[in-house]
Image (tube, rainbow, N blue to C red):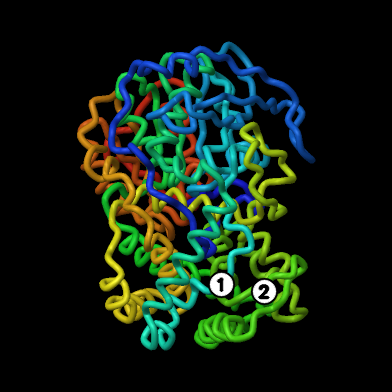
Amino acid sequence: MLAKLSKRPSLRRCAVPCVAGLALLGAGLPAADDPAPGLARFYDQKVKWSACEGEDMPKDLKCGKVTVPLDYARPGKGTLDLALARYRATGRSRGSVVLNFGGPGGQGVGQIAMAGKDFMGLTNGYDVVGFDPRGVGRSSPVSCGNAPDDPLAATDGDAAAADPQAVLEKLRDAAAECTEHSGPVLRHIGTVNAARDLDVIRDALGDGKLNYLGFSYGSRLGAVYAAQFPGKVGRMVLDGVDTLTEPLSEQGVASARGQQTALENFLAWCTEDIACPFGQNRREAREHVVEVVESLDRDPVPTDFGEAFSGQDFAGALAQGLYSRELWPSLQRAVAQLLEDGDTSRLEAFASGGVAHPPWRAAHRGLTDPQDVPMDNLPAALMAVNCADDPDRPAAEQVGRDLGRLRARYERASPVFGRYRLTQVLMCYGRPKGTDFIRDEVKDLDTPRILLVGTRGDPATPYRWTVETAERLGSSAVVLDNRGEGHTGYGSSKCVHRKVDAFLLYGTLPPDGSSCGSDHDTE
């Protein structure tokens, strides 16, 4: 899940149903604190900073790259370039703090360009660095191309009941589309490899320890790094804490339930406004949303790109807009534009992270041009990473047998987001199982103290995940309880912002279990 920082919806976490991801090869082995043989050359590089490419990039933001092995088990068999961006410290620097904005699939370079002002306080002591992880943004982006919507049939109760094997075959075909459009990086994607990349970045920045601020999925990445490189952990903050143990099927139900609650809150706000496209009656508004999803699934609306905008695309756009109250006015206008004019452009902006659908260029291993990042990169990367990180792969017979029960469970969690979330879970079917390293090995850390921020009203990462992950990480974990709303706390709570900055800049940790009240309360 992407952090609630930038107000530009195109940079939000996108979870449009899209198939991607083969299992991470050799991911079960943790890395040592010292580079293994064959990796030394990757730890002997320095970043060369220059002006960033692309429109509207801040003048004080500089960009660079680091080179990492495609396959850490065979470091001589190909490389990837990872895109970096940096704001320099305003005074004396104590090194860098590296940011990850979540997803998985969020572009760090684009997000830090848009949301840089949120982190200017950290430049009092640090260079502030964002990066595009492997498979994301300019770093060899994965894509599923113009993959058909046939995988959605897996969540169509009638189709699944009539011929479940045909549904499973469509899922396999969609996976092949993703492989064709993504190239070799798809076989080496996932959080274990991304964490190893993060250590190469740390060294290339000249830092002996990694100082890190990770949001949502970025908390998973941070925890995996800490398990792999405990001796390299500096000051680390995990905000909007992800689960390390729940299977994707359970994560999907939790997300559907949380987003349904966020939708109820949005509709309560919207129906107070005469301009609300769903009307002024809250109960009727809830029914209207369901009707729009069903209507668009039956009869999708064409878009400017020649593709169809379905009810599941609509659910995906709603999901992104609901992460932050600051986005609600924009979401309201986007929905009105669809219902009044049949124009999907504003809603598409909530669900897309790029601008094109280029084919994979087999000879290319450098940074991708910004204008060539595939439109579906964010959802394709999300599924690729989640599949690579999840070791559960039910057999075909079990998938076919459980489809009806799963659909009913998801629709009970949310009549709007249930099918959308279930489709995501099914997209891993047929792929080799992912790594078991995260579930089995990321626990009982022997590191300096790590600050975990959990938000009580978070629609994407439930507060209980913060508590469970803290217990799993052990005595290193310090929990800050944010008694507010929205996804993550740093961008929405002044109290959380102050406490995180105080820890990163000065090493001042709040007491374990302490809390931040709502900004509307007296602190």
Q: Is residue 18 left or right of residue 31?
A: right
Q: How many marks?
A: 2
Q: Report the front residue among 326 and 389.
A: 389
Specify the amino acid type for callout 1.
Answer: Asp
Residue found 44% across the figure and 82% down from its top: 156
Q: Quadrant of the C terminus?
A: top left
> Which label is found at residue 308?
2
Residue 83 visible to the viewer: yes
Circles 2 and 1, Cβ within 8 Å, touching? The answer is yes
Residue found 33% across the figure and 31% down from its top: 450
Residue found 63% across the figure and 29% down from its top: 85
Q: Is residue 162 above or below residue 226?
A: below
Element at badge 2? strand
Q: Is residue 306 above or below residue 44?
A: below
Q: Report the front residue among 281 and 437.
A: 437
Report how far apart the C-alphas of labels 2 and 1 lie in the structure.
9 Å
Element at badge 1? loop
Provide residue 358's location: percent of width, then percent of height. 70, 51
Specify the amino acid type for callout 2.
Answer: Ala
Residue 231: image quadrant is top left
Mark 1 lies on residue: 149
Q: Is residue 514 above or below residue 63?
A: below
Dot 2: within a 10 Å radius of its alpha carbon, few (fewer than 14), some, or many (20 or more) residues?
some
Provide residue 325's location: percent of width, then percent of height. 56, 59
Q: Is residue 274 left or right of residue 485?
A: right
Q: Is residue 443 left or right of residue 218?
A: left
Residue 340: image quadrant is bottom right
Residue found 25% across the figure and 30% down from its top: 476
Q: Report the front residue among 223 and 463.
A: 223
Q: Report the front residue among 518 and 461.
A: 461
